[in-house]
Image (spheres, helix red, strand yellow):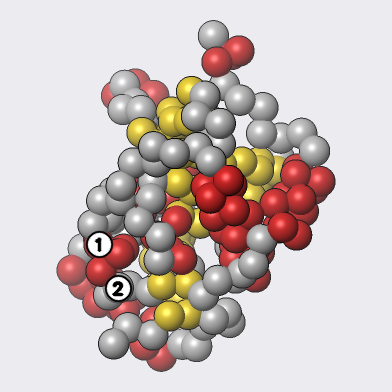
Amino acid sequence: MDDEFIVDTEDCEERERAFRERGTARPITVVGNPVLHKECKDVTAFDDELARLVDDMFASQRAAEGVGLAANQIGVDLKVFVYDCMDDEGVRHVGVVCNPVLEELPADRRVLDDSNEGCLSVPTAYAPLARPDYAVVRGQDLDGKPIAVRGTGYFARCLQHETDHLYGYLYIDRLSKRDRKDVLKQMAEGTARYETVPND
């Protein structure tokens, strides 16, 4: 059933540039901001406003040099994420998913990869986190049509990470208390390379 998955590897350069050039980069919300710590609202209107948000998300993602960005990372309470991410084979994937749901993998498909993970909302900090090296996300495209996206390796991690965001979870929420403390210390000692929203 390969035809159920979208093709997100063609015309990546042109598609990403078109989104980004229409958009305006917005500052990134960081850990502690309430919008990051609760489940976002479902996208119900597939309209010009949503299209403008996605343009801004691509612009923001590029400005911050990210590989994925969820709407709540620019302070918008909606279930949508964008990505511009390489998989482990060096193939580039560019796309957008509204109302994503991560498919539960059968146990025999689960191979954990414990590479380092980082997040634009936790600037300058990284920690190893075990995640399955294959992921399938189902959701809708910008027109509301059902889509499925699959990824391996680093791209699988990206899909899981961005879907987590929209349900109110940061990757640090999946770490042990000690690792989480270490990540927050790294963040406190670092300086983000991009504009962030200060938490009052």
Q: Which residue sits at x=52%, y=24%?
A: 145
Residue 181: horizontal and vertical position, in percent?
24, 77
Q: Which residue sits at x=18%, y=68%?
A: 177
Where disc 1 sits, the SS reads helix
Residue 74: horizontal and vertical position, in percent?
46, 66
Name the side, left or right, on which 40 lies relative to 74.
left
Q: How far apart are marks 2 and 1 (CA)?
A: 7 Å
Marks 2 & 1, CB-CB < 8 Å contact: yes
Q: Name the residue under label 1.
A: 37
Q: Is residue 132 above or below residue 30?
A: above
**Crowdedness near tag 2: few (<14), some (14–19) or many (≥20) residues, C-alpha within 10 Å:** some
Where disc 2 sits, the SS reads loop
Residue 120: horizontal and vertical position, in percent?
48, 68
Name the side, left or right, on which 112 lies relative to 96.
left
The kind of residue on which mark 1 rests is: His
The kind of residue on which mark 2 rests is: Asn
Q: In this view, does 56 lie above or below 155?
A: below
**Crowdedness near tag 1: few (<14), some (14–19) or many (≥20) residues, C-alpha within 10 Å:** some
Q: If the image is split into quadrants, where does the N terminus sit?
A: top right
Of residue 102 and residue 74, the one placed in the foreground of this image is 74
Q: Name the residue under label 2.
A: 33
Name the side, left or right, on which 181 lies relative to 16.
left
Q: Which residue sits at x=67%, y=27%?
A: 7
Query: How many numbered marks are there?
Result: 2
